[in-house]
Each structure stands twice: as structure tokens, then as C-alpha cells.
Image (tube, helix red, strand yellow):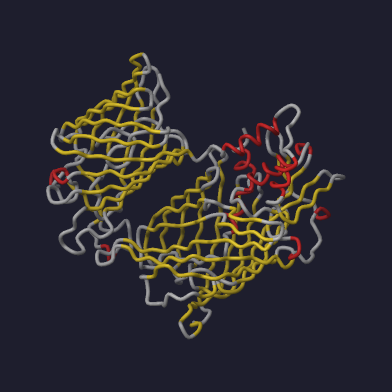
């Protein structure tokens, strides 16, 4: 049998046929996103009144576990405020039986019950089996049963502060369209993973369609619903685990016998990416700092490529002039804490670093109000950073506003957040202390402490801050008193396979509400995706967050100056909005987010 690759998707963005999902297990770290059109006579929300567009993202967060997020928006709104932002839905699929030669794959799919309107609610048990028909032709057969009921909230979007309140059972027979209510089944007759013909019974109608996958990533598909109306869609798939081809080439060159060093011109180009570089041939240590890449392993590979016989050396990456630890490249990457006599002496650092400028997008948004479906505050920051002393950096820049319909503050060019940050490292102990004007309109002081063995599973953190509100007006800066006390403690446990962190935190948040939060965070090669649920005195919510690098990275670079994009864009979505549940502010970086990038499990997972 052929290994099944995540290709065509059903109407809600899950692996499947046209309307129905399948139980096929997708590749670990697969990410697929796209769009489907649903015609007017088969509309889920306003059946026979409006057609619909469904936007989706589907990620295999863990082996066997998929998370699907979709947004259903009606087309051709007649009444103002009818559709709002659309029906937001989160689904979870777990494959509890893998396919074998004699047994089908079996999966359960559940829709999160906290939606107010879940027109595509999918609570189903499904089984799928692949049969080889010879000559690269395969048949994927799927059958399942969809629940005739589901749970949703009898709530208004304007009082949406508790996602587990006002739950009620909805019978699908009372809806205009009963999506996946009862038995369903179908088949996909495909040529490898390149193209196929689909036919299905979706519990209501017979549907048929075709799809083709181009360039191994882009899928286009179309179908006929009940021999009546056309549906179509497209999606794009990536895998977030493999390294870029350039870096895989570097690894292969380092593993060759003997290792293949870079040509002189390439070596010079690679070394120009690093700052505060010291090559100690006596102790076989290379001390350096790189600010281009979110993933520190990329810097290690470039250094290994640039220096011959680097496998016998220890690499010591720094952050703001402070060493993180000593790493040695081999078949497996090893780590050790630095002794006190190995730590560099304090000294003036400005002359050892480039003038570094970068572009940083900032985006905040509220979703869901019918009168204003999207309220956003978007800006572009031109940032820079001056390393003054060991661990001490001054962050500054200019903010260029793009949109703001979240409040009545003026859209004026103004200073970006300006603050001092002191980073310290003592073996397993790390400290980040900041003072100044922070993100999220807070000024004051913040200190973070973390006990973190970068080769062990446990880490513990404390954070405290005293801040006040500030923002820029046309005539100056508006201040409020520094009376916002933030006190948070957390404990995190890391599962080495597959780079999964479970984190429980709690305390007093920015709005004075007290409560707790649980995070599930998966690290991929160059990205990070997390799910969370939180409860405080102000309400209960859930959501997701992600961090991704911002292309193209380096834009222009010389010996003394560099212009680039920021190393990452980090954003968090909360299902509720406007109730100040567990709010925080940013000070440039969160200590636990920064340190888990240097954990040996995360770095070793990228080794061949």
C-alpha cells in the first residue's frame, strides 16, 4: 500500500472526501490551510438563502492528534450585521487505531462545545481503509456515523465571558441542514497521491468530485452536491519538521568522511552573520552571538559549516552577550553548563555588535461583534537594540500605525516601546529584568526568574511587575499611576518526543483578576503552536497561539550594519474578548519562550 499523504480535504478542512471526514492518519507536523465554497441550496447557516465560504487550517499537533480551526462566512449579506465575523469552530480528531494490513484506521472527531454558532459541528466515529488495486491505483474507503445531536452555547457574543456557561443540547433535525447526522460513507479512487475521483453519501445526499495535487503541496478540487450544485476548494500543505534544503546540505557536509569545509567565500559570508565572535583554538571553544534566526540550531549549523574540524569544538551561543551554555556537535548534540571561570568578564559591548535594525509587525484584534466584525490595531515597528554591557540592552525604535479601530487613540508616528533589559545566566538559573515603556501600553518594571536545566524535563518560573497605562496623544504622553501588579508562577514539564511542553501557571494578572492557565505547546523546527485554557475571576476562555519566523530575514548586511525582519512573529487568539481575562504585557521576550529554544531535545530532534 502507498503511504497516504494529507491531500484533498472535506468542506471543513479535515482530511476526507467532499463533505465527509476520513480516519486516515496524517503525517506528524503536517499543516494544511485553504478555502472551500459551499453553494446556496446546501448552505449550513442560512440554507437556500446564502452561499458560504469556509476558511480553515488543519495541523497534526501530535502523532494521531489533529486540530482543525475553521471559519464559516456567509456570502451576499442582505441584512447588516447578519453574519458578524462568521462561525468560528475548533475540532479535534484522534486516531485511536492505526491502519494495518487487516484492520482499518479508526478515529473520533469532536467539536469544541463552547461555540455559539457551530454550523459545521462534527461529532463522529469514522473508519478508513486503503486497498491497492495495482499499477499505482488505490481505493481509500471510509464509513462512519455522525451524532444527531451536539452541544453549543445559548449565549450572545456581547456577554461571551465564560465558554462553559449556558451549554445546551441541539438536535440536528431541527436545523435547516443536518450536517453528518447519521451514517455516512464513500471512497476515493486515486492515482498515487496525485489525483482522484471521490463519491460519497454524506448522511443526506450523494456527492461526487475530482481533485488533483500540483507540485506535491497545492490541491485543487471540485464536486457536485446531490447532482445539483457545484462546490469547489483549494488547499496548500507543508510539513513543519524538515530543515530547509540548504541546512540539510550543511549537515551532510559535516558528516562526510572527512568533513567538507566551506569554500573561503562561503565561509566569509557565513561568519558575517555572527557577532561578538571569539574562536579559542587552545580550549577548542567558539563563542558567538547570532540575531538573525529564531532557531539557534541554524546558527550552530552555519558555524559548523564555516569552521573546519568544528566537530571537535564546543559552540557557546550567547544572548545579549551572556553565554547560554556549551554545545558539542556530534551524532547527538550534547550540552553542559559553563563553570564560573568560563564566563566572560563584564565589559562594554557596543563595539562588538553591528548596528542592527529590523521590521517588527504588531497586530491586535477583537473578533465577533456583528456591528464591527473585526476590530484591529496594526502597526509596523522599525526597531533597534544597543548592547551596552554584559546582558544589558537598550531597546528602541519608531512605530508606524496602519490601522486602529479598537479605540479612539490617534494614528500618529511615535516612539516604539523603549526599555532597558538585563539578562543574566548562572547555570540552571536565568533572570530577565526590564524597565521602561513596554508593549500593550504599559510602563514600569518587570522581572522574570526561571530555573531551567536545558537538558532536563522540568522548569519553574516566577514573574512580577508593577506597571501603569500609557499612550501617546497628539500633544504628548498620557500616564496613569503605576498600580497594576502582576504576580505569576508556573511549572512546566517537557516531553522529549515530540517536543511537547505542558505548562501550568497562575497568579494575579494585569487587570487584577486572579486565576490559572494551562498550556500545551508543541515546538516544530522553525515554528511553535500552542493551545490553552484559562480561568480567572473575570471569566473562562480558551484559544491558541503560534510563533513563526518572518521572511525574508536578512535584507541587507555589511560588516557594521544590518537591516532585517524580526526573528519571529508571535500572536495569540482568545475565543472571548473584551472581558480582560488573564491579560499580560510583553517586554520584548518571555523568558520561558526564549530558553526552550536552547533545550537539547529540541536541538537534537533536528539532527539527522
Going by the image, does 502 lie left or right of 554? left
Picture quadrant of residue 407: bottom left
Among all residues in the image, which is located at the extreme bottom? 475
Going by the image, does 194 lie left or right of 496? left
Asked whether 476 or 456 is in front, the reply is: 476
Quadrant for the N terminus in the image: top left
Quadrant for the C terminus in the image: top right
Image point 29% across, 33% down: which residue?
125
Image point 49% across, 67% down: which residue?
508
Compared to residue 480, the image places residue 258 above or below, namely: above
Compared to residue 144, the image places residue 562 above or below, namely: below
Going by the image, does 346 lie left or right of 446? right
Q: Position of residue 321 (x, y in %)?
A: 72, 59
Going by the image, does 202 lie left or right of 302? left
Among all residues in the image, which is located at the extreme right? 282
| Count of numbered circles in the view | 0
Among all residues in the image, which is located at the extreme front? 265
Compared to residue 526, the image places residue 139 above or below, namely: above
Q: Position of residue 100 (x, y in %)?
A: 40, 21
Picture quadrant of residue 200: top left
Compared to residue 596, the image places residue 484 above or below, namely: below
Picture quadrant of residue 346: bottom right
Q: Position of residue 370 (x, y in %)?
A: 25, 64
Image point 36% across, 13% down: which residue?
134
Q: Position of residue 152 (x, y in %)?
A: 25, 52
Amino acid at each position: 500500500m502507498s503511504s497516504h499523504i494529507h491531500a484533498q480535504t472535506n468542506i471543513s478542512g479535515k482530511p476526507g472526501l467532499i463533505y465527509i471526514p476520513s480516519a486516515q492518519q496524517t503525517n506528524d507536523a503536517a499543516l494544511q490551510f485553504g478555502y472551500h465554497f459551499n453553494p446556496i441550496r446546501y448552505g449550513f447557516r442560512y440554507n437556500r438563502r446564502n452561499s458560504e465560504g469556509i476558511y480553515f487550517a488543519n495541523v497534526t499537533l501530535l502523532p494521531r492528534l489533529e486540530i482543525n480551526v475553521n471559519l464559516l462566512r456567509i456570502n451576499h449579506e442582505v441584512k447588516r450585521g447578519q453574519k458578524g465575523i462568521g462561525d468560528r469552530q475548533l475540532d479535534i480528531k484522534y486516531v485511536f487505531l492505526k491502519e494495518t494490513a487487516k484492520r482499518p484506521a479508526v478515529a473520533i472527531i469532536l467539536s469544541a462545545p463552547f461555540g455559539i454558532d457551530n454550523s459545521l459541528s462534527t461529532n463522529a466515529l469514522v473508519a478508513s481503509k486503503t486497498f491497492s488495486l495495482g499499477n499505482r491505483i488505490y481505493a481509500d474507503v471510509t464509513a462512519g456515523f455522525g451524532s444527531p445531536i451536539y452541544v453549543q452555547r445559548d449565549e450572545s457574543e456581547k456577554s461571551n465571558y465564560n465558554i462553559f456557561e449556558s451549554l445546551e443540547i441541539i438536535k440536528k433535525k431541527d436545523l435547516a441542514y443536518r450536517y453528518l447526522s447519521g451514517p455516512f460513507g464513500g471512497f476515493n479512487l486515486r492515482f498515487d497521491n496525485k489525483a482522484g475521483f471521490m463519491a460519497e453519501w454524506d448522511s443526506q445526499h450523494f456527492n461526487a468530485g475530482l481533485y488533483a495535487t500540483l507540485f506535491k503541496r497545492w490541491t485543487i478540487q471540485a464536486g457536485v452536491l446531490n447532482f445539483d450544485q457545484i462546490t469547489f476548494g483549494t488547499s496548500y500543505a507543508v510539513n513543519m519538521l524538515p530543515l530547509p534544503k540548504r541546512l540539510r546540505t550543511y549537515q551532510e557536509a559535516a558528516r562526510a568522511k572527512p568533513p567538507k569545509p566551506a569554500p573561503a567565500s562561503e565561509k566569509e559570508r557565513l561568519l558575517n552573520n555572527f557577532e561578538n565572535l571569539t574562536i579559542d583554538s587552545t580550549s577548542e571553544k567558539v563563542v558567538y552571538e547570532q540575531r538573525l534566526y529564531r532557531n539557534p540550531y541554524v546558527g550552530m549549523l552555519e558555524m559548523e559549516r564555516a569552521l573546519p574540524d568544528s566537530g571537535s569544538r564546543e559552540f557557546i551561543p550567547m544572548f545579549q552577550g551572556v553565554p547560554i551554555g556549551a554545545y558539542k556537535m556530534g551524532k547527538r548534540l550534547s550540552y553542559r553548563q559553563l563553570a564560573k571561570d568560563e564566563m566572560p568578564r563584564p565589559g562594554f559591548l557596543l563595539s562588538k555588535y553591528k548596528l542592527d535594525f529590523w521590521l517588527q509587525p504588531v497586530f491586535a484584534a477583537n473578533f465577533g461583534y456583528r456591528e464591527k466584525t473585526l476590530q484591529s490595531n496594526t502597526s509596523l515597528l522599525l526597531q533597534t537594540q544597543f548592547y551596552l554591557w554584559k546582558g544589558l540592552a537598550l531597546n528602541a525604535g519608531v512605530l508606524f500605525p496602519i490601522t486602529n479601530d479598537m479605540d479612539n487613540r490617534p494614528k500618529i508616528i511615535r516612539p516604539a516601546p523603549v526599555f532597558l533589559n538585563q539578562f543574566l545566566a548562572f547555570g540552571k538559573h536565568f533572570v530577565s529584568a526590564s524597565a521602561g515603556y513596554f508593549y500593550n501600553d504599559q510602563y514600569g518594571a518587570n522581572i522574570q526568574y526561571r530555573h531551567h536545566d536545558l537538558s532536563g524535563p522540568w522548569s519553574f518560573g516566577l514573574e512580577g511587575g508593577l506597571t501603569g497605562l500609557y499612550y501617546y496623544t497628539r500633544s504628548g504622553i498620557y500616564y496613569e499611576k503605576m498600580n497594576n501588579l502582576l504576580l505569576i508562577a508556573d511549572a512546566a514539564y517537557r516531553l522529549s518526543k515530540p517536543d511537547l511542553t505542558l505548562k501550568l501557571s497562575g497568579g494575579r494578572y494585569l487587570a487584577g483578576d486572579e486565576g490559572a492557565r494551562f498550556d500545551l505547546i508543541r515546538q516544530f523546527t522553525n515554528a511553535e503552536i500552542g493551545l490553552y485554557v484559562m480561568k480567572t475571576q473575570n471569566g473562562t476562555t480558551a484559544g491558541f497561539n503560534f510563533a513563526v519566523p518572518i521572511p525574508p530575514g536578512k535584507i541587507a548586511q555589511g560588516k557594521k550594519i544590518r537591516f532585517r525582519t524580526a526573528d519571529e512573529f508571535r500572536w495569540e487568539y482568545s475565543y472571548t474578548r473584551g472581558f480582560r481575562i488573564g491579560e499580560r504585557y510583553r517586554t520584548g521576550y518571555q523568558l520561558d519562550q526564549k530558553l526552550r529554544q536552547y533545550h537539547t531535545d529540541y536541538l537534537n530532534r533536528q539532527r539527522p
